[in-house]
């Protein structure tokens, strides 16, 4: 759907949503150098479509967009189990309207930046969430490995039991099932 | 039969052959009965032959000799072959007889003098031929010539003989022989006769015309010759007689030699009598003419007393009577003329006297003096009609002649006396027998009653003007009476003219008097009028001025109203425009600032100092622009009434912290002291919009720092002294007023500029912007924000010493104004013609239970892979989360083609949920595409579609759909249905 500028293979993905192309370019520029794969969407609808297909470490969401705006998009994201925990940073120009920020937070934003914002602040925030994501990923991978080891140990245990009971065929079968 | 008979027969036949029809064979010769029959038959035949021969002879005799053309052979007596012969004979007679009859008919007619008959050249439709035709033509030619000859001769005879047209000649053409001779003779006779008659006629004509010198000269014979000599003798005698009579007539008639006598010699009888008669006539004529001449001479001399007394008869007697009558008439006419002359000359004279008269009394007197003697009257009186004051009409004696008044005023009313009567009846009255004592004509020597009195009314156009009375001792002559009649008419005209003139003069003088009076009056009036007019003009001028003023005012008012409306509208538009524009400007600026900042930071460490400087300049300029836009945005928001105010409890300690944080670095950079003081024991608290409050203070403080080069900037926060009224209701009615005073030791503001600096884009002087930057919006926004918060900003300043800008706020933000202008939409409304997203019902019914409930079917679906093909991502997202909750993996395609691709790429797909309606490739087409691949023949494809139209389901099934469910989908139903399809 959209091209990303510097694809880092296997890197965590950042979804950037803004109806203005130049803003997407600026966001990509800000994230340049971070170990992330930026993915852009020009509308709320497109963001949802991307989310149906991919997992993302963080979402940068423009609040004001024609059609489905940032708040509605966030609401959809928050309703889906698989995406509800993806951190959303709202970016908005309508800073003076305090209730917009409130709406943003209410919609589940982890952060709310008003334009013009400090690019370094955004970069720092994104990298924090990306780190978090990576950590989580590692954590779950470790958990999975641990579980695998545990299962293996159990299987080995079971095989040993069979051997103990003098049925080596059964033991072999059990071991084979694990691969 | 024996030979004897045969011999007999042969002999008899031989005689028959030679024409002897008398031969018979005697019966006695017959030897038997048979022979008897033969003889009998032979005899009969011969007899018959003889009889028929007789018939032919007879018919020839009758027809040929006797001319009986009607005779025919009796056809009935001839049987067999005979009939043909008889027919031929009869028709021969016919053919010969008919032309003969025709010729006879014509000849008979000619003989009878009928030349109009002609021979028909055909008989019974058969044209004549041969000799007959020739004869027919000849006869007809003959008849023609005869007829033509007869016609010509008849014509000439008629012309010459009967009608007297001489000179006629017969013209008969194509005749010869005797006929030509005959014609020539007729013509010769006709021309002879013509010549003789013409000669006699010419002589007779000459005689009749009085030419007695002509003689008949033509050759004539017989009777005509006799006539010729008689005529010539007559002409001779006539000529001689004529000469004599002419001579006498010339002498007596022309030359006036009366007494001449005709001497005609050698005449006798009648001619002699005639001559004597002429002489008698001449002498009588002479006598009569001499008598007439005598009388005529007397008349010529003027003697009208003569009469012609000579005896005369006939024409001369008539002449005599006529002359005598003429003399009488002449006499009468002369008398009449004399009378007429008298009448005319006297009328003319009196009329002349009347002309130019102006005085009625004078006229009456003059008439009396002139007319009375003229008509041989001895007494005259003139009564003038006069109208009294009371309107009564009287006839008053105005002039008289020879009249001796009786001593009382003589006047009459109309109808009174004869004078009154004459007026009333408008008729002349004449009295020839006057009663004694009626009137007396008196002279110095004696007196006598008049014999005749005439009373005449003087009228004009039927209206009486007066009466004239004349009395005479003798009777008035007709002439005098006529004169008087005519005179009174003239007098009437004259009197009327005088009266009219008098009336005109009166009127004239009256009108002149009136005019004079009027002139006097109008002089006065015009003076007052003039004054009035002036006043009116002045008044109307004033009125008009007022009117104009009013109109001007009205127009000005209208103009103002319109301007105001336009202004309101314009400012609304402006604000709206600015609000939109600022937003539009701001948005791209954000990314520009971001990128410039990134560049300026030179993270890649690959930019030169210059480039970094550029990037920084871009960033700074962009930031300035952004803040300007923000200001404009604020201003326009305030003006458009769209600035939201959200009140909260604001700790003033927070404010001072903010100020410290924001302005300390700047102040220190400029070497200024910055202080925040709080008056009073405790830090006051306000319930207001913290953001706006900050914004105002930020502006005031940044100005203070900006316009101060040395010294200090102080913010003092405290309760305002309760004594001063602000003239701002929200402040005056507030329980407490908090004051935020920003004091500096800067350049100050000239007093006259103090009110100006709060206006938009206004700075104290033209150089400010150059020296200090800024646009002059800060204060106007601040003041407007302060108003929004129910407060105000006041300023005190001394040039070159410093300024104090104080913000006063009520401690509690008052309620928002009731009539805030309606908010304007920031986003433009969708343009017309833009596609409107079709109303697509939600896929899922709102889920009341957030937690998924495990059922056998959901358990079956756990771990299944589902492909959703649908373009409406909102719905799909919701459905996906639901399916994922039940342990399903969801693949998604937003269009048909993508769906087909994903199907082929993911063989693990257990079931497809297909939206029926999609742009481009719809559900049916996509399904058909999938079904075309054999490996997916059994892949369950469930259709999701909006309210089913009849036939939709059938179409979907036909396209290859496995099942069908209607949106919005009940999740449980869907899971149940899906479980049915997933193994
Ligand atoms: N503290 C002050 N001392 C002297 N002059 C002042 C001070 N504050 C304001 N002024 C005068 O009032 C003008 C209007 O001030 P304002 O804040 O509206 O505009 P600005 O500061 O010039 O520009 P901006 O605020 O839009 O950047 C200033 O230009 C300056 O001339
Ligand atoms: Mg300012």
Image: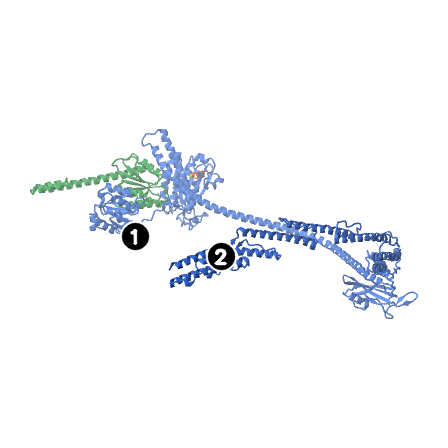
Q: Which chain is green?
A: A
Between residues B917 and B716, which one lies in front from this camera angle?
A: B917
Residue at 36%, 30% (x, y): give it. B611
Task: Residue B313 in the image: state x and y as whole percent.
Answer: 84, 60
Instruction: Give residue B470's quadrant in the image.
Output: bottom right
Q: Locate the N terminus of chain B by quadrant.
A: bottom left
Task: Residue B163 in the image: state x and y as whole percent.
Answer: 69, 54
Q: Residues within 10 Å of mark 1 (few under 14, many from 20)?
A: few
Q: Secondary structure at mark 2?
A: helix
For ligand 2, the image quadrant comes to top left
Between residues A28 and B6, which one lies in front from this camera angle?
A: B6
Residue at 51%, 47% (x, y): give it. B560
Q: Secondary structure at mark 1?
A: loop
Give the labeled residue for mark 1: B950
Give the labeled residue for mark 2: B89
Mark 2–mark 1 distance (CA, rounded to whole Å): 121 Å
State the mark number for residue A117.
Answer: none
Q: Chain of mark 2?
A: B
Q: Residues within 10 Å of mark 2 (few under 14, many from 20)?
A: some
Q: Chain of mark 1?
A: B
Between residues B340 and B741, which one lies in front from this camera angle?
A: B340
């Amino acid at each position: 759907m959209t091209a990303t500028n510097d694809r880092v293979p296997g890197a965590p993905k950042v979804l950037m949503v803004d109806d203005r192309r130049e803003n997407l370019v600026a966001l990509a520029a800000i994230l340049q150098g971070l170990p992330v794969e930026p993915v852009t969407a020009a509308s709320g609808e497109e963001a949802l479509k991307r989310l149906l297909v991919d997992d993302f470490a963080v979402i940068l969401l423009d609040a004001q967009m024609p059609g489905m705006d940032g708040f509605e998009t966030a609401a959809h994201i928050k309703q889906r189990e698989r995406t509800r925990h993806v951190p959303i940073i709202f970016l908005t120009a309508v800073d003076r309207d305090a209730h917009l920020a409130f709406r943003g937070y209410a919609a589940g934003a982890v952060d709310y930046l008003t334009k013009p914002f400090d690019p370094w602040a955004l970069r720092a925030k994104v990298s924090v969430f990306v780190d978090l994501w990576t950590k989580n990923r590692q954590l779950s991978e470790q958990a999975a490995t641990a579980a695998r080891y545990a299962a293996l140990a159990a299987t080995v245990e079971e095989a040993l039991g069979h051997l103990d009971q003098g049925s080596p065929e059964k033991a072999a079968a059990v071991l084979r099932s694990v691969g | 039969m024996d030979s004897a008979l045969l011999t007999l027969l042969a002999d008899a036949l031989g005689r028959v052959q030679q024409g002897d029809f008398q031969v018979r064979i005697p019966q006695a010769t017959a030897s038997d009965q048979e022979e008897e029959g033969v003889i009998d038959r032979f005899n009969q035949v011969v007899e018959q032959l003889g009889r028929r021969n007789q018939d032919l002879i007879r018919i020839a005799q009758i027809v040929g000799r006797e001319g009986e053309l009607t005779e025919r052979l009796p056809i009935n007596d001839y049987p067999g072959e005979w009939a043909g012969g008889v027919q031929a004979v009869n028709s021969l007679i016919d053919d010969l007889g008919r032309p003969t009859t025709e010729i006879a008919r014509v000849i008979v007619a000619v003989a009878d003098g009928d030349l109009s008959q002609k021979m028909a050249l055909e008989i019974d439709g058969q044209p004549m031929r041969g000799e007959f035709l020739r004869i027919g033509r000849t006869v007809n030619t003959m008849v023609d010539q005869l007829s033509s000859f007869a016609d010509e001769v008849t014509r000439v005879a008629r012309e010459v003989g009967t009608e007297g047209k001489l000179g006629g000649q017969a013209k008969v053409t194509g005749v010869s022989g005797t006929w030509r001779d005959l014609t020539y003779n007729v013509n010769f006779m006709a021309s002879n006769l013509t010549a003789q008659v013409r000669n006699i006629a010419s002589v007779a004509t000459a005689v009749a015309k009085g030419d007695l010198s002509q003689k008949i000269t033509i050759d004539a014979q017989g009777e005509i010759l006799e006539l010729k000599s008689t005529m010539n003798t007559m002409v001779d005698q006539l000529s001689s007689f004529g000469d004599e009579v002419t001579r006498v007539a010339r002498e007596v008639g022309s030359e006036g030699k009366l007494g001449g006598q005709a001497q005609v010699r050698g005449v006798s009888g009648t001619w002699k009598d005639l001559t004597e008669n002429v002489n008698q006539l001449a002498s009588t004529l002479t006598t009569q003419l001499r008598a007439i001449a005598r009388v005529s001479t007397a008349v010529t001399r003027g003697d009208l007393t003569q009469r012609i007394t000579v005896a005369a008869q006939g024409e001369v007697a008539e002449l005599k009577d006529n002359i005598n009558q003429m003399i009488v008439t002449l006499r009468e006419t002369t008398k009449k003329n004399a009378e007429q002359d008298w009448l005319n000359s006297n009328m003319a004279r009196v009329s002349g006297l009347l002309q130019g008269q102006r005085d009625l009394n004078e006229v009456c007197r003059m008439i009396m003096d002139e007319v009375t003697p003229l008509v041989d009257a001895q007494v005259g009186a003139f009564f003038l009609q006069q109208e009294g004051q009371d309107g009564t009409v009287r006839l008053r004696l105005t002039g008289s002649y020879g009249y001796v008044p009786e001593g009382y005023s003589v006047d009459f009313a109309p109808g009174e006396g004869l004078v009154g009567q004459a007026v009333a009846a408008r008729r002349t009255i004449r009295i020839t027998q006057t009663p004694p004592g009626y009137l007396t004509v008196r002279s110095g020597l004696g007196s006598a009653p008049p014999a005749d009195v005439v009373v005449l009314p003087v009228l004009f156009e039927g209206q009486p003007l007066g009466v004239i009375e004349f009395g005479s001792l003798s009777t008035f002559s007709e002439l005098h009476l006529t004169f008087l009649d005519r005179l009174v008419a003239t007098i009437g005209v004259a009197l009327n003219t005088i009266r009219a003139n008098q009336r005109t003069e009166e009127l004239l003088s009256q009108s002149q008097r009136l005019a004079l009076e009027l002139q006097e009056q109008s002089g006065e009036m015009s003076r007052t009028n003039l004054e009035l007019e002036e006043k009116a003009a002045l008044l109307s001028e004033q009125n008009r001025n007022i009117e104009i003023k009013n109109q001007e005012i009205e127009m000005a008012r209208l103009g103002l109203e319109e301007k105001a409306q336009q202004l309101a509208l314009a400012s609304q538009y402006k604000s709206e425009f600015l609000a939109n524009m600022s937003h539009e400007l701001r948005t791209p600026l954000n990314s520009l600032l971001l990128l410039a900042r990134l560049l300026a930071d030179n993270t890649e460490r690959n930019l030169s100092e210059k480039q970094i400087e550029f990037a920084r300049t871009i960033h700074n300029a962009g930031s300035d622009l952004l803040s300007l836009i923000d200001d404009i945005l604020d201003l326009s928001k305030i003006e458009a009434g769209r600035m939201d105010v959200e009140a909260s409890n604001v700790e003033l300690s927070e404010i001072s912290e903010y100020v410290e944080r924001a302005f300390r670095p700047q102040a220190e950079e400029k070497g200024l002291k910055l202080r925040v003081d709080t008056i009073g024991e405790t830090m006051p608290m306000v319930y207001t919009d913290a953001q706006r409050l900050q914004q105002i203070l930020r502006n005031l403080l940044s100005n203070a720092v900006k316009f101060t080069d040395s010294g200090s900037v102080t913010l003092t926060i405290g309760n305002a002294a309760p004594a001063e009224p602000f003239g701002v209701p929200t402040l005056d009615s507030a329980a407490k007023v908090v004051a935020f005073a920003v004091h500096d030791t800067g350049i100050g503001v000239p007093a006259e500029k103090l009110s100006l600096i709060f206006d938009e884009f206004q700075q104290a002087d033209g150089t400010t912007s150059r020296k200090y930057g800024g646009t002059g919006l800060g204060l106007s926004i601040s003041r407007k924000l302060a108003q929004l918060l129910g407060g105000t900003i006041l300023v005190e300043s001394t040039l070159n010493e410093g300024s104090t800008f104080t913000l006063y706020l009520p401690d509690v933000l008052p309620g928002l104004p009731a009539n805030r202008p309606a908010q304007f939409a920031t986003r433009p409304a969708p343009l017309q013609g833009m596609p409107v997203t079709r109303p697509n019902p939600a896929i899922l019914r709102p889920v009341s239970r957030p937690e998924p409930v495990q059922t056998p079917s959901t358990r079956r679906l756990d771990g299944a892979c589902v492909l959703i093909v649908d373009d409406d991502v909102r719905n799909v997202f919701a459905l996906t989360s639901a399916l994922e909750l039940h342990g399903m993996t969801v693949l998604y395609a937003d269009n048909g083609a993508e769906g087909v691709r994903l199907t082929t790429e993911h063989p693990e797909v257990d079931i497809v949920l297909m939206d029926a309606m999609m742009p481009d490739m719809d559900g049916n087409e996509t399904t058909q595409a999938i079904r075309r691949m054999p490996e997916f023949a059994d892949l369950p494809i469930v259709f999701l579609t909006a309210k089913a139209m009849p036939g939709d389901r059938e179409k979907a099934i036909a396209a290859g759909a496995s099942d069908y469910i209607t949106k919005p989908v009940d999740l449980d139903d869907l899971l149940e249905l899906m479980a049915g399809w997933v193994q």
